[in-house]
Every structure is written in structure tokens, then in C-alpha cells.
Image (tube, helix red, strand yellow):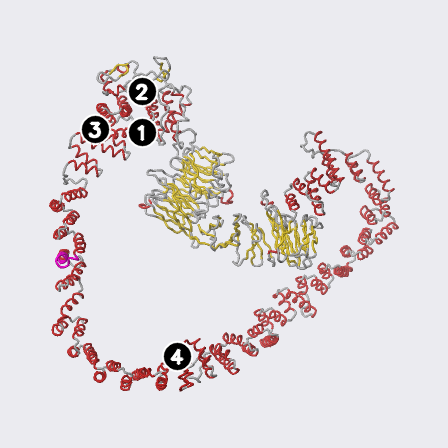
Amino acid sequence: MQLRHVKNLQPAQSHVARITACCWSPNNKRLAIADHYRFVHLFDENGEKRDKFSTKPMDGKGTKTYMVRGMVFSPDSAKLAIAQSDNIVFVYKLGLEWGEKKSICNKFVQNSPVTCICWPHVRGNELLVFGVADGKVRIGTLSKNTCRNLYSTDSYVVSIAASQDGMGLVSGHADGSIHRYYFEEAGSLAGSAKLCTSATIPQCLSWGESIAAAGNDCKVTFYDPRSGAQQQCFAFDATEDREFTCCEFNPSGHSLVVGAYDRFRVFNYNMKQGKWEEGTHKFFENLFSITSAAWKHDGSRLAVSSLCGAVDMYDACVRRYFYKGKYEFTYVSHSQVIVKRLSTGTRIVLKSQFGYEIVKVHVYQDLYLVSHTPATLLVGDLGSCKLSEVPWSGSGNERFVFDNSQVCMVVNAGELSLIEYGRNEILGSCRTEYMSPHLISVRVSDSPDMDDDKRQKTIAYLIDRQSICILDLVTGIRIATVQHNNKLDWLELNKRATKLLFKDKTRQLFLYDLVTQTKATLLNYCTYVAWVPFSDVVVAQNRGDLCVWYSIDTPDRVAIVPIKGDVEDIERTDGKTEVIVDEGINTIAYGLDEALIEFGSAMEDRDYEKACDLLEQITITPETEAMWQNLSQLALQDRKLHIAERCFAALGDVSKARALNKIGELAQQAMGDDKVLNRHGYDHYTVRAALEILNKNFKAAEAIYLERNKVNEAVSMWEELFRFDEAISVADAKGHKDADKMRRTYFEWLMETKQHDKAAELREREGKYADAINLYLQGGLPARAAHIVSTYQVQIPQQQQEAIATALFKAQMYEKAGDFFEKLGLNERAVTAYRRGNAYIRAVDLSKRVFPGYVISLEDEWGDWLVCQKQVEAAINHYIEAHQEMKAINAAISARQWNKAVQILDMQDPHDPAVHRYYKTIATHYEEAHQFNEAKKYYCAAQLHKSAVAMYTRNNMWEQAHEVAKVHMSDQQISDLYVSQARQLELQGKFKEAEMLYRKIPELDLAIHMYKKAKKYDDMIRLVAQHRVELLSKTHLNLAQHFEKEGNYKKAEHHYIQAKVENVEEEGIQEGWKAAVNMYRSAKLWDDAIRVAKMHGGTGASRNVVIAWALDLGGEQGSKLLIKFGMVEQAIEYCNTRYLFDTAFDLAQRAMPTMIPQVHYTHALYLEDEGHFKEAEEEFIKAGKPKEAIEMHIHNHAWPDAMRVASAFDQASIPDVLIAEGKFAFSRKDYAHAERFFLEAHEPEMLVNLYKESGMYQEARKIATKDAPHLVQQIDLDEGYNAKSPVQAAKYFDDAGEYGRAVEEYFKITVDHAPVEKCVELWTRCFKLCMNQQPDSLPLAKKVVIEKMKNVDRHEQAAGLLELISEYRDAVEVYVHGKLWQKALGLAKNVSKDLEEYVQEMRLKYVDDDDPNFEFATPEAGIQFYIQKRNWEQAMVLARKRDDETRKEVAAKWVEHLISEEEFLACLDVISKDGISLDFRFYAIYSEMCKGLMAHLKPDGSQDLLSLRNGLYQLIGQMHTIGRPQEELNTMSTYLKIIHRYAMAPVMKQDGFNEYAAKLMMTIARFAGIVPADKAFFDAGTAARDIGWTNTAFVLLNRFLDITEAQDEDEPSLEHLDNTDFVESDIPFDFHISKELAVDTEPGEQVRQWVLSMSVDKKLEGVLKTVKCQKCSTSNWEGSLRCHSCWDEVDECIITGFPATKKINCKSCKMPAMKDATTEPTSHKMQLSGSWPEQVHSER
């Protein structure tokens, strides 16, 4: 799993701002996060923030003191459930689109805090599961808005997770236990159970492939979901990870992300090894703890949140690749792939529901997806985004057909499987050999309103080429089987699968109605046919006519349009339908009647009004007439009488139209009579009966009448129809009084009209059988008469029996006659009658009971009769019963019941020739059917083994033929048979087949000979190469020689090249192409020889052929030839390389004399190689190369010969000879002779170099001193260059005066080469060399040497070197670097003042803050130093040693620093110790300090507050003295009054003046807005509550709760606050509300509970205590200083803060106080208030 950071959704805060929960919606469109402030933020799939809303507390108006403990989307993504710690779960309805209205649709209130939540999708959106603090796991039902316990434990629920399939869930508890629960859908596993116990509290829990648990022990443990057994455990370092805080499986369950401190870890499941492996981990510094993680449901994104509020999104994938440049495949897990179309950006998730690994994905037709897993097949439609996964065990060679937009057809091993997109099961399968899309038609109803199990799903396919099977894919029942006489080549069902079109090889077009099971011929010749898309209209072409059936229910009604081409296609777009016809040059579009087509669609949708309107626009034709008829029938069925009336009127059926009109009037009348009926009146019995009569459903009309007991109406109906028998039946059944009369009248009428049969039936019903028999005979119905006799056992005279029998025989009703005779006991005559009537089943049945001897002959006759009737298959069993086996076999064969025939044959004598003939017939059939194994079986049964072998050979099945031959024939017979067959095939020119036979014998030589005789040399060579490799070269050679003899040099060339031969006719040409070259040379075809040589041997070989040609020509012609080819030089070289020196001399003399020395030279080299040195010396001299002769002698150490040749021919080479002899002597360590030879050759330098190379510097120096003094210095240098250490090398170069080289070596010296002091000495030498000898290297030495000395802590020496070159500033820098401050200061003072200040500044930078030995230049410098270092304690230590003003000034700066750090309470401590500075520069600082303190003040009796109060008192006095602006005075005075209250109230309380203290604190509410509003009312209310003033406390604290609720809003405002309680007070209405709370959660919650408890107290008045205004007598709050009516103001009591109505003034400060408050010792009260400056006294 690879994770890549995509973007940051929300930045981290500078404080703790925990993201408490995050989750993705199942539709992948939303990400929700819950923040520290209980707001839910909604992001889209791209990470863009789209919405935000605030959560609500349980009571709706209380303070938000809860935490969001969990959050989860519903399975349909439309709802969001939020678990809160205030004992409630809210379900918010968000909708599926952005901008939809949000609302709370469910609330689940609990008795203890909700700790965790999940939403399993086992039952859609119905069930919500959450854990609570009391150990219970509860389930909420959304439809009922109720909760119940799922299971209970004794331990706090810390975590909960649902399984991937939603069937189960697990919960983790504080005691380490993990419990598992399966829903009822899981079968036998349903219920809860303790799964296992974790070693730590499983605060991280998730369920994927395994159950993962983690906690504060830094271990991740995987458990088996079923057994609870521990599978694996991963432990990590606690110092790095601290603890694991969350974990989450990806949607496939194969990857796990576990969050920790500053990092998260990834674990991947190895499916092949069946174990978990640790993957990559992501580390982020300062990320702090990861609080939640959520996977996108397609697995492509991971959202991670942190403790400080950061939310990041990561891209997740296993691998990603591009497919054909059109699609991007992202494997987010082994079993899930996201397919993205690059052109449009649309995506679809291909996922295995069973967790199998997706092997490979293919895209067909840019629309369909196909992928395999080890056990399933996945197919998908990119257009509709429908996916299917079905079990599959195919071979991988499947063929996929996508012609149907709803179904994928998979062809595999002769079986056709259908997969409907969007369903995870195979729709159906069938076996057929005919897989062409034209021979298979599938129709699936696509009605969106229809349930899936009611949708029609049908397939039509071929059983064989003449039979169609139509199968219902839902039930698996065969709907119909269509037999046809000819082979079929096309078929297709209509859209509703009610009609089937098919066409045969004779091009006849047929229609099969699946409802009526009838077949109709549409055309006798058809070249094109198709259903018009989305309709039941058929378009076909009959030669030059275009035939259109707009109403296929009436196939005889067809519209014909003449055309002049071939129909290509049907296009239906933009409300029109056109048939595209190719007329050769042009393509013409013939439009169809869209109204008629739309009529079919309207009929399918049962929109009769539209259908009727469409038909009325069309002229009446046979086609439209059928449509009117169809519409009328359907309208009648659906009781659309006005539509049916219009239809019949259009059809001209006036009677029906009038009848319907009358029925409509009847309905109107019935509706008026019976108010209970619907508004159409069609439910009235008269209307219903009339409709049934119109539809000729008379029985139904009768039933309707009888239901209402309307017997007369029913009888009248039948009588009007002249169906008196029905009328009499009704009358009899209902006991009609005129029934007998009706019966008599009816009989008389029948007799008058000579309806003897009806009269007989009437008498039969009356039980008058004799009369009935006579009447039946008179009416010519003897069978009915016989039926009465046999049924009712009527005794009649013999004469009458004969009359009945005679009548039956006369009417050829032999079976009836037989039955009549049988019942009369005349069995012989009965059998005879049955035989004449071919009623053999009755005859055989009777004979078995009476005449057993007749049975066999009857069965034989029966079989013969069935054969005559072409019912051959039915005759088989009768022949078997008659023991006519041969007839049975013949019938079975005729009926093509081959298995039946075989069964019968197997029971016959296997040696009977007739049996063999039948076996041969059966075998021939199976051979024609290509069922060769069956054919072989029966050929062998017929003893026709050769025929079996011949069958296999005819069909190129050589292995099978050989197997048969081996079993049933001897080797010789096999050989003879194969050879004879092969020769026959050879005569027929079937050489490949003959070869196969020869291979089977094996007689490969005969096959080779066959190909040779047929001159198929390529095949001959192939066989030789395969089976006679040792003869391959010889064969090629023979063929080459054969073709060469025939003069076919081209083919001969080919075979020579392929052969490996030796040809002795030309020396040097030995194999392959060389033989071909030789052939052409022999034939004097030199051009071809050159071509072959150049092609296969290259340019060199072709030149050799040219040379050979020249040699063949010889003399002048050869020279001309070589000159012609420009190859004289090559010819000479050719001769030289082959040591043909005489020929080479001849060519050189004739064509190129300049080459003669070269020939001598080449000859000399040849002689030298052969060891003929004397002759070689002569040739070298002739070639003008005496030096080569000298070198030859030197090489052979023949020093006299070398000296001789040099003296005679090249005296300049004499020194070379001496040098070579000297080197030879030196190599043998004969130094004396070597020195002699070198000195004789005047080459002392070479001798010196040899000594140096040998490391013999003394000998070299000796020779140099005597014979080459200029080399002495170089010898010393070389000795230095070869030194092993830079120290030695530097010394050599220094001594030699090579100062540049010496400096380079000094630079290389490190402490690894010598002790530190030695190195310093050498570096100093280097520096001084650069100063004195190498000034250009001085800058580099300054850099290198000084740095090396600094590195070994030799700063003083380094600085000294810099002082030598007057680099004083750099020297000071070195002293400073070494912290040699005295040296640095000493040098700096001598250089410049600036440098001295720099040293002082650097000294301050390096000095430690608490260094006791450090002395500053001035105390002010020390104070400034410590202020810059933020060491305020040390700064204050120095400041306190100074004057008081300095101390307060530093303290003020410290306060300023603390304000910038927002540490306002720390300011109190500073001021308490060091007071307030009265310097005007710090007024703004103290004002800012007081403003920040307002939210932190507490009446806790702190001495720091008293000090601040006194300091502010002095500060305000100073401000008044120096004349600061009144606005500043007012602000500071207000802060003083507030701080005075918080400081003095606890002092009063301590001294027992509780009421005074309470009043003083209650007046804090007067300063709401300056003091945070929630804090002001909280402190005032709690003071009143503590003293017992309940009413006042309730009003003030209720105001506090209102303010906290306003603070929970996105933008807090005062508009919703009720100010009624404060109208009569001077407490302000308009003040600022901060978003941040100034009161802690716990005391705020306690106040909320107190207010709630008091609100139910009936004694509570809930108003402020009031007093009358002395001026206007209006009621005012007792603590108000100003009347809200007359605005009269009263002085404030300095002790209580209340109005001082009866007052006295302080003698020192003149501040007023209530007289009642001074009943105690006045001095004590004044002491509490202290002395106030005059400006505070004067302020109102």
C-alpha cells in the first residue's frame, strides 16, 4: 500500500483543538469531521469545504459541555449519526445533494454517556449500534425511534467496529475484553460472545480480514474473527509511538492504518502467505497524536486528523497503471480497482465482494470491463456503472460477447453463460454449439417500476441447426421449442420477449408467437430483417420491396414500399425512424410512420388515450385496422369504454359502438342509483354483465346476475341468445317456477326444428334413456347412443344393439364401436372393431385380458401402422414387444434414435451379418456427425477396423488412427495398410497426408523418397533435417550436384551454401558458400562466384575470387583484370599472405613496381619467422630497411651481427645497438658493462633514469655528478616525490629550494602524520615560507594553516601568525573564536574603538546567563543584556540593586513581555513584588494588562490583587496629576473598580461581612462586556446564590446560561437574549459576547444543573429585588445607581457597590458610603475601602 499526501484540508492550530471524529459517506461524495468546538465540517470528494453546522446538546438550550464521541454516515449516505457524551445520539438528515435542508430525524437518549458508534449495513438504514459507558451495546431502530440492548457487559465500552459485510460487529471494553456479535442474517453464528481478552485496553479496534486491536502498550494485535485466536502481534518502541490512538481497515479489509504520536503505521495482508506484514509508516514532526482516520469507501483516499486540529488527505494505492492510454487503473487493494476514463474523468470501482485478488482488467469496446479473480469473474458496464461478480472456474480462454446492453454473454468450452449487469449471480446458462450473436437472443425487461423477481428474462438459442429453444431464465422452465425443416441462420426476440423472428438458409422469414405457441410465415424470401429499436415493429426486405409490420400481432397486415437497393440499418433518433438503403452510388433514408411506431410504445405503456389519438391521425389501412382491433380489446379489458367505443366506431363496427354507448349510459344511470359505486359506475352488476355479454363471456355474465339473485335477467339473457338449454339449467338451479314449462316448450321447439341431437340431450338429462337413444340414432349420433347404453347400463333389444353397431361402423367410428361391443361383452367383435379403427392401444389392452395370443401380432401391426403414419420413433417399442428386433432397429435408425438402436443391437448376435450392416450404418452416421470416437466404436463392432482407420486418416486424426490399428491389426498389416493408403494419397497429390501415414509406420525413408520422386525437394530436406540429420549435408550436396549437372546453378548454389562439404578441386575452398564459389569458378561464371563470395564472405572473399580469376587468366590478362578491378595491390598482398612470393614479384614487376620493396619486406618477415636470419637480413636490405634487420639481430641478442649491419648500412643506429646491449646488461645486473655501453653511447641520462627507477639514488647521483651534473638537483626532487609521508616530502622540497612544492606538502600535513606540536611547528614553517618565498600562496596559507591551528585549539599561535602579516581584525576573530578575551581586548584596543566594542559584544554573546564570574561594563549593560536574553529574573536582580524607578521600569518591561505571551496572571506576581511604574510610557501596557486580566480574575483573596489595586490607585493619581486625557482616566478607573471588587470581596468575607461582599460582587454584572459577559453574570450570580438570595441568583445565572448558548453559535449575537428581567436595572443590555468561554466547563455545568433544579421550584419568583426611586417612585433593582425611568443617579457605596441613599463621606478621600454600613467601627470600614483619589470619587 502506497500513501501519497494530496492536500491539507484544515491547518493545525497553535493549541489543542482535537478533531474528535471523521468519516466518509458510502457514496464517496462527502467527508465529515467533528472539531473541538462541536462543529461538523463537510468536505466534498476533492477536499473542498462545502458546509458546516453546529451540534446540539441533549436539552437543546443547555451549555455545550459535551464531546462528540463518534460519527458515522448511514449506508445510503443521506443521514449522519453523532454520538455525544451528554447521553444522546442524534441522527441528522443531510440528503444526498449539497444544499439540501438539514434536520434531526432521530434522537436516542441514554442513561449514561455514549462512547462509540457504528452503522452496520446488514439491514440498510434501519439499525444503528452504539456503546455506552455502563458497558452496554445498544441498537437503535430508526423507523420506530426506539432503543434496546444488543448485549450487556460489566465494563465501559471503549470502541466498536462493524465487519466489512455488515453481518457482525465487535466491541472493546475497559477490562481488555473484546466481544463479538453476529446478526440473525449470519445464521448459526448469530448472537454475542466474548471473543478474546487484549493485554491492554483496546481503544483502537477495527474489523477487516482480521480483527485488529491496539492501545497504549504500543502493540498491534490481529485476532481471528471466528475463534478469537491471536494470529500476529507487532510491538513498537513506546518512546517513538507513545501510544496508538486510532486504527481503521481499508474497505477491502486488507490494509490497516494505525495512528500514533507524530506518525501512523500501515499493515498489509499477504494473501499468498496468509499473514500480516508491516508496511510503510509516515512520520510528521509536530503532528502530535492522530485522533481519527477514515477511508473513502472506494479505498482511494485516507483522511487523517490530529490533536491540534489538522486534517490531511492521502492518496492510497497498491499500484497504478494506464491501459491503452485511455484508462487509469488504480489498485487500492488486491481486490479493488478504480477504473478512471481519462477523457471524461468518470470513475467506477471494480471490487471483488469476496475479497479475491483481481488478476487483470480488460476493457472491451471502450465500454465494458472484464476481470478475473482466482474464483470469480467480474464484468461491468461503464455506461450504467453496473458491476457483477459471479463464481467462475473458467480456463482463461473465454470469449465475451457484448452485443446486448443488459447482459454479457460468456462462451467457454461449448457452454454459454449469461451475466446480467448489476447482479452477482449467473442469470442462466445453456449448452449450444452455435455461439454466433445472430443465433442467440436475450431479452431482459428494463422496467424501473418492476421488482427484479418479476422482470421477464428470456433467451432464445439453437439446440441444433433446425431447433430453437426458448427458455425462461428466471424459472429455468423451457417456454417453447421451435422445430424447423431447414437450417436456421438468424433469430431475435422482440423487446417484450413475446414474439420471435427467425430466418433459415432458404431465406424464409418466420414469426413465432410465444403466447399462443404458433408459427407464421412472414416472407418466402428475405435478405434483411430487424426489429425497430424500442418497439414491436418489424422491418424486412423482400428483394425490391421493403416490408413493414406495424402491428406484428396481425402478421398478414404488412406495409410494402418499393426500394432499389439493400437495407443497411435502421436509425431512430430525434422523433423519427428511418431505414437506410444503399442504392449503389447513393444512400437513401426511407422514413417510417412514426405515429404507428409510437402506437406500439403507447400500447406497451397502456397509454390508450395517446394510442387512440395517434391512430386517428392515420388513414384506415389493413395495418391500422389491426391496431384499432388490438386497442379495442385492451381498452375493454381495462374498462376504458370511451376508448373502446372510439375504436369500434373507427372499425365501422356500429353495433359494438352503440352497445358500448348504451353500456356507458347504463353506467351513468347506475352511478346515480347507487351512491356507493365509484364515479364511473362500472362496478354495477348490470354494467359488468353487459360488458361480459359484449365480450361473449356469457357464463361470466350469468354469474354476475346470479350473484345478485337476478335469475330472471340471467334466464332472459340466455333466451335472447336462443340458448334455451342454458336458460333451463339456470331455472332448474334456482328453482324457477316456470322451469318445467320452459323445458316442454324447448323440447317441442327442438322436435319441430328437427334438432334431434339437442332433444336427445334433453331427454338424457331427464333420465329418459330409451327416448334419448332413439333420438340420437335419428340425429345420426350413434356414438352418443352407445355412450348411454354403456354408461347407464340400459337394457335394449338385440335389434337395437345391431342398429347402433351398424351406425357406428357406417360412420367409421370403429373405436366407439369397439368400446360399445366391449361393454356389451362382445370381446371378439370389439377387438375386430379396434383393429379396423387402428385403436391398437384398446385392442392390445383388451387382448391382454381376454385373448393373450393376439398381443404379439397386434404389437407388430401397431408398429407397422405407426411407421406408415411417420411415427417411427413410437413404433420402436412395439416392434420390441412383437420380438421384431430387426424392424425395431430399422425404425430406431429411421427415427435417428441412435442410442436406442445401439441398445437393441447390443442384445443381438454379434456375428450376425445383418447386425454388422446396422453397426456400419450407425458408424457412418457418427462419422458424418464428426463424433469420431463413437463412429470408431461401431466400425469396430462391425469388424470394419480398416474403415475406422480410414475414417481417422480422412480427417487427419493420425494418433487415433494409429491407436485403432495397433489394437486390431498386426504390425505388418498396419504397415501394408498405411503404405497402400499413403500411395493412394500420393497419387491424389495429398503428400502431407501421405507423410503423416509414413510417419506412423514409421517409414520416413519412403516419405523422403516420395518427396524426391515428386521433386518436392524442400519437403525432402525438411524430413532429412528432422529425422536423418547425419545425412543432411550429404543430401544438400547431392541435390547441389544434381542441380549443377542440370545446369540449375541457382538451386545448386542454395544447396551448396546449406551443405558442409569438402571440395578438393580448389585448394582453400572447403565448405558451404565456398563450394558454390568453386562451382561457379569451375563453370567459368566468375561474376556469380564474385557475387556469392561477396555476399557470404565479405569484400575480402570477393577480392580473393578476383585474384583467382586473375591467376587463372595469368600474365598480362590477369594484370589487366586486377587493374580493371583496381586490385593490383590486393593481389600482391594476397600472394604475400599465402607466401606466393614468386607470383607476387611477377605481379609487382608487371603492374606495380613500387610494390617490389614491400614484397622483399614481406618475404624478409616470412624468413625471419622461419628462422632464416641470414636470408632475412638480405631481404631487409633489398627492401631498403636495414634498421629492421638490426632490430631482428637485437631481438635475437646477436650483438655483433647487429653492430655489423649498423656499421655497414645505418651508422646512426650504432648508439641504439649500444643502448640495447646496455639495457640487456643492466637487466642482468651487470652494472659495469651497462655503464660502459651507455657512456659509450653518450647516454648517461638513460643510465641515471634506470638507477632512479630501480630506487638506486646513490648510484644515480654518482653518475650524474660525474657525467650529468645538471641532473643532481632533479634526483633530489625525485627522491622527495617518492617519499612516503608529506612530512618527509616537505622537508626534501624545502631543502631543495622547491618552496612551492614544499608548501603543497605542508598543506597536506594533518595530526595523523605527526604530533600536534610538531604539526604546529611545520604549519608555522609553511606560513613563514609563504610570507618570505611564496607570497602568492599567502591567502591560501591564511585560510588553510589558520583553520588547521584552530581545529587543534592553537588559537594563540594562529592569531600570532596573523599579527605577523598585520591582519589584526582576523587575529581578533581567532582570539574571539578561542574565547581568549584578554588577548582579543588587548589587541582590539590597539587597533580601533569599533573593534574593541565588537569584542565586548561577542563576549556578551558567548557568556552564560548565570555566569557569576562575568562582569559587565556597566549595570545598565547587564540589565539590557539579560532583557535581550529574556532572563528576567537576572535582570530584576540587577535592577533591584539600582534605584526604585529602575526596578519598576524593568518590571514594567517584564509585564509587557508577559502580555505578549498572554500570561496575564504572571503579571500579578511581578507587580506584587516590584510594584507599578508611574512613568507615562507604561500606561498603555498597564491598560492592556488589566484588559487581559478581566477574564482571569477570581475573588480568591489573593494578595497580588490587593497589590495591583493599590498600584492602580497610585497610577490613576499620577495620571490625574500630569493631565492625561479623560478617556484614559475613565478606562483605568473602570479597571480599578472591577479589580477593587475582586480584591476586597474575599477580605470582607474573611472578616464576616458576607452580605457586603455579596453585594460588592453582584455589581460586577454592571461591567458586563468589560469583564467577559459570561464571567460577569456567573460571578455575580454565584455570589448571590452563596449568600442565599435565590431569586437574584436565578436571574443572573439564567442570564449566564443564555449567554453560553449564544456563544455556541457560529457568530454569537445578543438578538435572541430576553432582557425583560433587567429592564428595571442599570445592568447593560448591549455588550460584546466573545466566542471563547471564560468560565470552566465543570462549574458552568454545575450552575446549569442548579438553574434547572430551581426552575421547578414553585416558590421561586425569579425576579430581581427592587426598591422605589426617591424621585419618581418607579421600581428599580436595589443595586441600580440610576433610575431607568427618570435617569436620576445615586452615589455608589464604596463598601457595597450599592446605592448610598443614606450616606456618609470618608474624611480622607471623600468617597461616599451607606450609613448602615458604618454602624460598625467606621475606621474599620474605611480601612476596607482605602483612600481613593479625587478623580475616582468625582466619576459617575
Image quarter of the C terminus:
top left
Between discs 3 and 4, the one toward the N terminus: 4
Q: Secondary structure at mark 3?
A: loop
Q: CA distance from mark 4 to mark 1?
A: 112 Å
Q: Residues within 10 Å of mark 3 (few under 14, many from 20)?
A: some
Start-end of magenta stretch: 1323-1337
Tag 4 and tag 2, C-beta contact below 8 Å:
no
Left or right of 1324 in this view: 264 = right
1289 shown above or below 1245 = above
Q: CA distance from mark 1 to mark 2?
A: 20 Å
Q: Secondary structure at mark 1?
A: loop
What amino acid type is highlighted by mark number 1?
Ala
Between discs 4 and 1, the one toward the N terminus: 4
Left or right of 336 in this view: 744 = right
Between discs 1 and 2, the one toward the N terminus: 1
- Disc ID at residue 1479: 3
